[in-house]
Amino acid sequence: MQSRGGLLVFLWRRNGIIQKCFHHHHHYPLSSTTPKSSCFSSCNNLFNLRSYSTSGAAEMNPQLSNDLIKIMENRLSAIEHRNIYLQNFMNQPEASPSEYSRANKELRKIRSSMELITQLRAKQKEIDGLKSLIAECPEDKDMHDMAVEELDEAIEEENRIHNLLLKSLLPKDDADERDCILEVRAGTGGEEASLFAMEIFRMYERYSHKQGWKFEVVDVMESDLKGFKEASGAISGSGSFGRLKFESGTHRVQRVPLTEKAGRVHTSAVTVAILPQADEVDVQLRNEDLKIDTYRSGGSGGQHANTTNSAVRMTHIPTGLTVAIQDERSQHMNKAKALKVICAKLYELERSRLHTSRSKLRSEQIGSGDRSGRIRTYNFPQGRVTDHRVGITHHSIDDVMQGENLDVFIDALLLKQEMDAIASFGVDE
Amino acid sequence: MILNFFPCLIRYSIFTPLPLFFKHQNLLPLSCSINFIKPISSSSSISAKTIQVPLFLKPPIYSTTILELKKFQNWAKSLSLSIGLKFLNLDNGPESNLLCRELNWLLEDVVEGEEDNPTGFLTLGCSENERLVRMRVEMEELYDLWKQRIEERRPFQYIVGCEHWRDLVLSVQEGVLIPRPETELIVDMVEELILKDKEMKQQGVWVDLGTGSGALAIGIGRLLGNEGRVIATDLSPIAASVAAFNVQRYNLQDVVEIRMGSWFEPLDEFKGKIVGLVSNPPYIPSGDIAGLQAEVVRHEPKLALDGGADGLDDLLNICKGAASFLKPGGFFIFETNGAKQSKYLVNFLNIQMEGSFQYVNSVSDFAGIHRFVTGFRK
């Protein structure tokens, strides 16, 4: 128990070490048939805080380090004090309705933490009792053994509650549960980049189907060779944003393009953006902020024209954001899709504004703020895909492109996210 | 299966339905389900023969190989690309990109494919070339249809027999005006109105004059729901048949009633009782008809386009009727030819018909053209 705890602290504290750990593990064969092979499944059991919620006797919880517990204890007593303060405040008759509702809201927010803290305090009291019982009766062997056994159980339970509390105190991304919009754009590399953009787009389409999500093509701008200059899709399914959000960034491809006569390997790039979906309410969209126009060439329109072109362009006047959709067969449907994309973009704008103002410090410290850097390389001659953020290489590129083994990267990235959150826990207070 | 005995090209034969036809409920003995696949049974009434089933609703009784389809696609694509900007420069017709997009939609409608990606097999490698796919028309006819599109400028919507309009897929055929994207806005405005004012939804009948394919009547019928009532009129028997077909497809036969006749003529009993009046009447000045885009002038019904010397004949007629047929507070919205007509009509309603209407306005479409005139009966 102790040694495992020590290892954990070490890993939590140093991102560099975590990456080394992954490097180390990737020497194990990451066979394509077992996407979550040895290192990840064990890492998941050890670290993945998501699994703690399904607590049970059999489940092992990592022992948190003393430092971490100390930081957490400070936070817990702060929450307890706040709770008492708010309770007292609510009992004062002179509180104004708005103050009252604000206090009530805050109380609701800390309620689940408070329930855990109450459990924790009861357990700690029990532990103290058992400890003094053990100290008082060293001569009664049966009693002593029973108390030691109970103490072990109580300590394990305390540890479980600590873990739950840690999870509840880590910053959450409210958007994780949302549906998302996928945007793929061909970058440097001309036609070859467009072809790869199409393949990447299809990769996410297949991955979505495998996850049981709904994938709907929103708009595609084709290149001359049937590649995609730009493409966007709407993905609906529980937690799709949370799982895909780390796919945002530059994906690099290295291979001999179809268009290359001399057989040289080229490097091209496509950019991927994953935006959480939002509705008009989320982004407080007002009708008068939207301008919709058809960007067709002149003419009298109406009964004069018979056209199947029902493209619309939607502009959000305050921000100047523009989205044009043309691939649906009716204007109404083009409009609905454009609205979906505009809402997602506005929501993302607002999120990144909050993100930068809230955690400027943190992102500088742990370098999590950059979303646009080169994140992954797809090397076809060597048949490998490497994710540069977690340092994982997967050696079956075809499986990845078929949407099969993306989870190798996604799971590691989610794990890294949690580790980063733990590492910065207490820092950004 | 009567329809299958009629070669698809012979479509101009118009059977006049018995006038009785429209007075009965269950006008067409068709399946009511939206996804009905079976075409009309042989026991259909005479008028049913005038109805063409859209391609996408035909049974996939033919088959062909992926290779054959790819050949067709290549042929049709190069034919489309050869057009370039020719039609656009000639009469504001479609350019090749648009034709290529129509080609994809045609394939989507005739091939029985996966729902998510109906024409996905066309991107499969050569190894799949011999695989069979099920088709709703024969290959020969498919070639013929695309020739008609390019050589005769037959509108795409008549080729596939349907028009996607709002969230509807409406059956259309020669003799019926293809609903335009601009007209969708009328339903949006009605929606906005009835959201604000529940009485517009519950208190009285809505009317669509010159319904054509039934687009506006069905769009509004769906907004009103089961308690609503919409009467749609049209002078053309073929339009009335197609509208009835579309109403049945959306299972709205208890909400939308089709009546044959000119404008207000079949609506005598509703004088002063109509709560909402919508119309997209013919408004193109007679002199402009000959110069219209080939798809329109060669194939669409003049009856639905030609609004007389200045295009205002029917619009003025409807404005006058609105004064006596709308109940106090009743709403109207008409589509017009643009700024000139809108301005004239706003003036006419405010001045010549002084005291009848209030809040008369013109509203622009998404191209910025003053397309609609709206207002309320005083």
Image: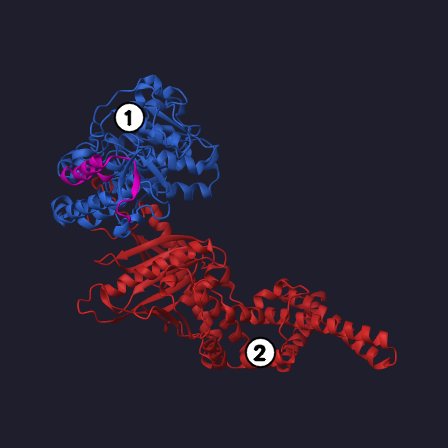
Chain colours: A red, B blue
Looking at this view, is B370 or B289 the one in front? Answer: B289
**Please, which chain is the residue tagged with disc 2 on?**
A
Q: Residue at x 28, y 26 (%)?
A: B3
Task: Name the element at disc 1.
Answer: helix
User: Dot 2 surroundings within 10 Å: few (below 14), some, or many (20 or more)?
Assistant: some
Q: Is residue A317 above or below residue B350?
A: below
Residue A233: within the magenta?
no
Quarter placement of the N terminus of chain B: top left
Visible residue check, residue A389: yes
A360 left or right of A103 in image = left
Q: Return the mark for residue A8.
A: 2
Looking at this view, is A22 or B294 the one in front? Answer: A22
Q: Position of residue A352 (x, y in %)?
A: 43, 69
Q: Are marks 1 and 2 in contact (CB under 8 Å)?
A: no
Q: Return the mark for residue B3.
A: 1
Quarter placement of the C terminus of chain B: top left
Residue B136: within the magenta?
yes
Looking at this view, is A103 or A137 the one in front? Answer: A137
Q: Position of residue A195 (x, y in %)?
A: 27, 61
Q: Which residues are magenta?
A: B128-156
Task: Name the element at disc 2.
Answer: helix
Q: Is residue A164 above or below residue A139?
A: above
Using the numbered discs, state the Cα–Cα distance from disc 1 to disc 2 in whole angstroms: 74 Å
Q: How many marks?
A: 2
Q: Is residue A279 above or below residue A14?
A: above
Q: Is residue B304 above or below residue A382?
A: above
* Residue type, label 1: Leu
